[in-house]
Amino acid sequence: MEGIVVTLIVIAVVVVVLIVILALLFGGLRTSIMFTVHSSEAVIVESFGKFKRVASAGLNFKTPFVDSITRPISLRVQQLEVNIESKTKDNVFVTVPVAVQYQIQENQVVDAYYKLSNPEAQIRSYVFDTVRSALSGLELDAAFESKDDIARSVEQTLSERMLEYGFRIINTLVQDISPDQRVRDSMNSINAAQRDRVAAQSLAEADKIKRVTQAEAEAESKRLQGEGVAAQRKAIALGIAEQYEMLRKVGIENSAEQLLLMTQYFDTMQDVARNGRSNVLYLPSNPGAVGSMGDEIRSAMLQAQAAHQADQDADADEHQERQRISAEQLRAQEERRREQARSQAEQAQREAQRAQAEAQQQQRRVPGYPGGSVPPWARPGSAEQG
């Protein structure tokens, strides 16, 4: 009987011990003694509200009912998005989204937790102040070009200010500078107009080059064609001269001109028949017409020679007229020079006469006599007469 009682007592003690252990492991007593900290996090342990230590990752212990822990503090890289609305130097309101990447340093967890009550709000304030100061001195176009400079300025300012609080600024990104939709439409219109102008200038320059090249090619073609025609006429003239000389040597001197004209006439008809584009051509086909054609050619040559002689006579008359006008102009200039010299000589003569009269008056003055004139009794010969 006693053995049964002892067994029951032992079993009861074991059950109580197991209950206590289970309560410690799975109940509120366990959380008051043990706590777990995840990787890349830190927990501050306080004793009656006073800082005690920083608990790192893993299983940690604390004194129940005495120590308390704070919320986990992340040691990872965090990003804060800040949208800033500011005005540029040329009075354009823009929205600038800025992304700030920061991290709490592990050895400064205490400063980051106790020195700043709201770190994100304070970072926003520094970003607002820096960006607005930078944009106020830049125009809109310069602001787009200086986006990286603004980001570096924000990063430098935040790094200097937040480092003493345990925050390390890793990077600052100015994602965009967005003006109002109407301003963007105007800028796009301006850019489109500038590109259209450049395109028009390029097309005009290309058309100019094309036209100049065509003109140069046409001029070169005309020059070569003229040289070819001149060479052809020279060869024809030389050939005609040789044929005329040959005919003269064999005794056909009087009718040589008519023979050459007839030969040229038939050669011309053959060439027209071969290269002409028309199917019908009305020309005199009898050899008697060659004589009249020769007369017309001679009369045309005589008229051309007379016109040339008239042009030469007209040029000679014009040259003589110019020489006559030049001679008259020279004579007029010479007459003006002589008249000017004559007037100068007369003026010099009048000056000389005036100077001579003044000298004679000066000689007739007597010193000490009132009025300065010589009295009648003081003239030469007056004493002898008295």
Image (spheres, helix red, strand yellow):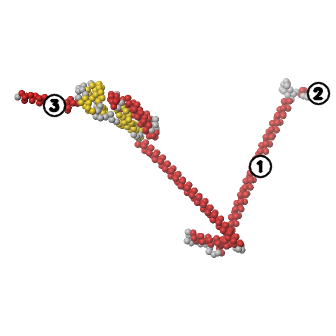
Q: Earlier in the sequence, mark 2 or mark 3?
A: 3
Query: Type of residue at label 1?
Result: Arg
Residue mark closest to the camera, 1 vs 2 = 1
The N terminus sits in image quarter: top left
The location of residue 299, given as percent across then percent down, is 69, 68
Using the rendered image of the protein, determine whether residue 82 is visible from the camera's viewpoint.
Answer: no
Using the rendered image of the protein, determine whether residue 127 is visible from the camera's viewpoint.
Answer: yes
Spatial CA span between label 1 and label 3: 150 Å
Towards the viewer: 24 or 183? 24
Query: Type of residue at label 3?
Result: Leu
Q: Are marks 1 and 2 in contact (CB under 8 Å)?
A: no
Q: Give the residue drawn at x 43%, y 38%.
A: 148
Residue picked out by circle 3: 18
Find residue 385 and name its label.
Answer: 2
Q: Is residue 11 above or below residue 268?
A: above
Residue picked out by circle 1: 331
Q: Give the residue drawn at x 40%, y 31%.
A: 160
The crowding category of the residue bearing disc 1, from other C-alpha atoms within 10 Å (few below 14, some 14 to 19, many at least 20), is few
Q: Secondary structure at mark 3?
A: helix
Spatial CA span between label 1 and label 2: 65 Å
Q: Give the residue drawn at x 83%, y 32%.
A: 358
Residue mark closest to the camera, 2 vs 3 = 3
Towards the viewer: 236 or 77? 77
Q: Earlier in the sequence, mark 1 or mark 2?
A: 1
Residue mark closest to the camera, 1 vs 3 = 3
